[in-house]
Image: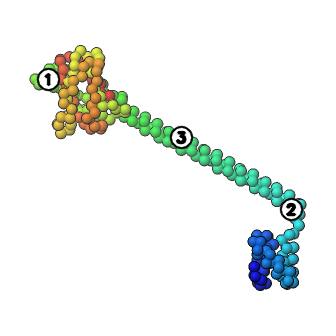
């Protein structure tokens, strides 16, 4: 490296003292210090300032302070972790209670998870009879765990034929016959929609279950 001026050496002096300059730069600075008494004196003063002997008592105090800081940091991390766990448990508990209340309300809103109907069928002129439900003349499948099925109870003595109409009177499912102890799927029906249910069977007492 070419010779460098005193201004550059003074700017680089702190880095040179800390030994963080490149070897080439260090050689240039050493060469300049060998020839420049002014920069050499400033280098000696700066070296003394940065190499003040350490007091053992101060070192011990600093070590204790560092230990206290580490313990405090560990305590804060532990406290934050405990708070996070507690908050998570509280949130999960709240979700559980809300979910439980919702299910309880849903179940309470319906007498059961199905509709059971005891029907005394008398032969009409066309053979069809409109079913009557406790909550009205229409079937609405809105209970919990609805499977959209109709079951002809096994104790019934004969077949039952079903027909389903929507609110406009249009036939949605036409003449589904179910034997005693058997069931039929009503996939065409929509949940929470009113349907008129018509049945045709031999005169007698029947039990019908909508699930």
Q: Which mark is residue 58?
A: 2
Instruction: Left or right? Give the position of 119 relative to 11.
Output: left
Looking at the image, tell me whether mark 1 or mark 3 is earlier in sequence order: 3
* Label 2 – label 3 distance at C-alpha: 52 Å
Q: Position of residue 53 (x, y in %)?
A: 88, 67
Secondary structure under badge 3?
helix
Residue plotted at (36% across, 28% down): 112
Residue plotted at (79% across, 78% down): 28
Q: Which mark is residue 93?
A: 3
* Label 2 – label 1 distance at C-alpha: 107 Å
Between residues 3 and 128, which one lies in front from this camera angle?
3
Instruction: Left or right? Give the position of 124 relative to 20.
Output: left
The answer to whether residue 54 is above or below residue 8 is above
Q: Position of residue 202 (x, y in %)?
A: 17, 18
The residue positioned farthest toward the left in the image shown: 125
* Label 1 – label 3 distance at C-alpha: 56 Å
Quadrant where the N terminus sits is: bottom right
Secondary structure under badge 1?
loop
Q: Which residue is mark 1?
A: 127
- Tell how many labels: 3
The residue positioned farthest toward the front in the image shown: 1
Looking at the image, tell me whether mark 2 or mark 3 is earlier in sequence order: 2
Secondary structure under badge 2?
helix
Label pair 2/1, CB-CB below 8 angstroms: no
Residue plotted at (11% across, 25% down): 126
């Amino acid at each position: 490296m070419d010779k460098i001026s005193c201004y550059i050496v003074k700017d680089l002096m702190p880095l040179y003292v800390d030994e963080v300059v490149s070897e080439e730069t260090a050689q240039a600075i050493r060469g300049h210090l060998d020839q420049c008494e002014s920069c050499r004196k400033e280098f000696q003063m700066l070296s003394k300032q940065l190499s003040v002997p350490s007091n053992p008592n101060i070192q011990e105090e600093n070590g204790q302070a560092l230990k206290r800081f580490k313990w405090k940091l560990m305590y804060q991390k532990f406290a934050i972790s405990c708070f996070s766990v507690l908050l998570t448990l509280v949130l999960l508990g709240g979700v559980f209670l809300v979910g439980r209340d919702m299910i309880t309300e849903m179940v309470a809103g319906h007498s059961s998870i199905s509709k059971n109907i005891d029907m005394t069928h008398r032969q009409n002129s066309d053979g069809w009879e409109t079913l009557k439900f406790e909550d009205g003349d229409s079937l609405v499948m809105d209970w919990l765990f609805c499977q959209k099925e109709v079951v002809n109870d096994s104790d019934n003595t004969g077949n039952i034929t079903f027909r389903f109409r929507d609110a406009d009177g249009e036939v949605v499912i036409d003449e589904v016959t179910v034997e005693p102890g058997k069931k039929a799927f009503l996939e065409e029906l929509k949940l929470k929609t009113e349907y008129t249910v018509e049945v045709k069977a031999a005169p007698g007492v029947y039990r019908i279950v909508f699930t």
